[in-house]
Amino acid sequence: MERKRKIITFILHIVLIIGAFVMVLPFLWMVLTALKTVSESTSMNPFVFFPKTMQWENFKIVIEQNDFIQLYFNTFAMMALRVFCAVLFSAMAAYAFARLEFPGKNFLFGLVLFQMMVPAQIFVVPQYLMVDKMGFRNTVFALVFPGLVSAFGTFLMRQFFMGLPKELEESARLDGCNIWQTFWKVMLPLTRSGLVALGIFTALFSFKDLMWPLIVNSNSDAATLSSALAKISSAYSVNYPQLMAAAVLAVWPMMLIYMVFQKQFIEGIATSGGKL
C-alpha cells in the first residue's frame, strides 16, 4: 500500500512538473526571441531555440523609441485608481443589495446582473461620448472612467456580505452604530479576502485592457503598456525580437508584483472561488 502511494505521488509530481514547464515555455520563448536576430526569430528550423549571440540592442532600440517610464506611470495609475474605485463603490453597493431593504432592490440588482451578461463593447460608444463631452480624452481619468463602478465586483462582494451572520449587525445597532458605521467598522473588515480578490481581478483586467486605451487615448503621452504594444506590433510587424523585447519590458512589473504578493493572490482567488 505504501509503495502504491509513493508511485501515485511520483506520477502526480511528474504531471505537475510537465504542466509547469508547459506554462513557463511561452514566457521563456518570449525572452529568448527578444535576444535573437530577425532571421533567427523567423527561422523555420524548430531546433533554433537559443540565440547564437545575445542581441541586447533589441531592448535598447525599444526603450529609445518608447517612453516606458510614462507608460509604466499611466498603466499603474490606471490600475491603482480602478482598484480603489471598484473596491470602494462595489463594496458599498454590494452591502446595500445584501443587507439593506429598499424599494426596487431586486430590480436594480437585476440590472447589475444584466450588465454582466452583455458584451462590454456595447458600452464603448456611450462611455467615449461621455469622456469626450467632459473634455477628458488623452488623460489618465479617461483610462479610469470605465472602471469607476464594477458590476462583477458588486456581485462578488454581495456574496461575501450575504455569508456574514445577521447578529453582527444587530450587535452593532445595539451599540449605537448607524448604517455607515456598521458597514465601515464592522462588516467591511470581515470581507478582507473578498476585497483582496476583487482588487486582484480588477488589477489584472485593467493591466490587459487594450480596446478602451486605444480608443480614448490617441496621444502617446497618455498610452498604456497594452496599447503601446499594439502600436509596436503594427510598426514592427516582421521584427519579432523588438516586439518580444517590448513585451518583456511590459510584463516584468506584473510578474514582480505577483512574486511579492503571491500569498495574497492565491488566498484571495481561492476564497472567492469558494464563495462563488
Image: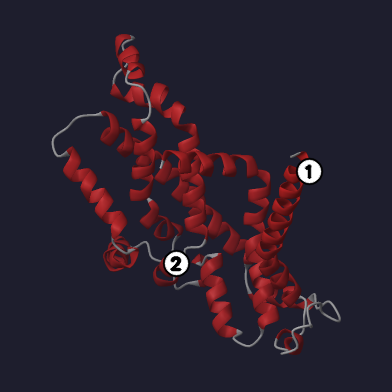
Residue 214, horizontal then vertical, whole percent: 44, 71
At 44% across and 73% down in the image, what residue appears? 218
Labels 1 and 2: the sequence-earlier one: 1
Image mark for residue 198: none
Compared with residue 261, is residue 247 higher up or lower down, i.e. above or below? below
Cα distance between the residues tagged 1 and 2 = 57 Å
Q: Residue furthest left?
A: 103
Q: Residue at x 40, y 21 (%)?
A: 186
Q: Crowdedness of circle 2 by 10 Å Cα count: few (<14), some, many (20+)?
A: many
Q: Quadrant of the C terminus?
A: top left
| Residue denoted by label 1 | 3
Q: Would you say 174 lies left or right of 202 here?
A: left
- Which residue is at the front of the view, 123 or 221? 123
Residue 50 vs residue 276, the one in the foreground: 276
The residue at 34%/31% (across/down) is 162
Q: Pinpoint residue 67: horizontal percent, then vertical percent.
A: 62, 68
Residue type at mark 2 is Pro
Q: Decide if residue 23 is on the left or right side of residue 172.
A: right
Q: Give the vertical position of 86 relative to 72 (above or below).
A: above
Amino acid at the residue labelled 1: Arg
Where, by quadrant of the figure, is residue 87 drawn? top left
What residue is shown with label 2?
A: 213
Q: Quadrant of residue 115?
A: bottom left
- Residue 187 lies left or right of residue 1; in this view the side is left
Q: Secondary structure at mark 1?
A: helix
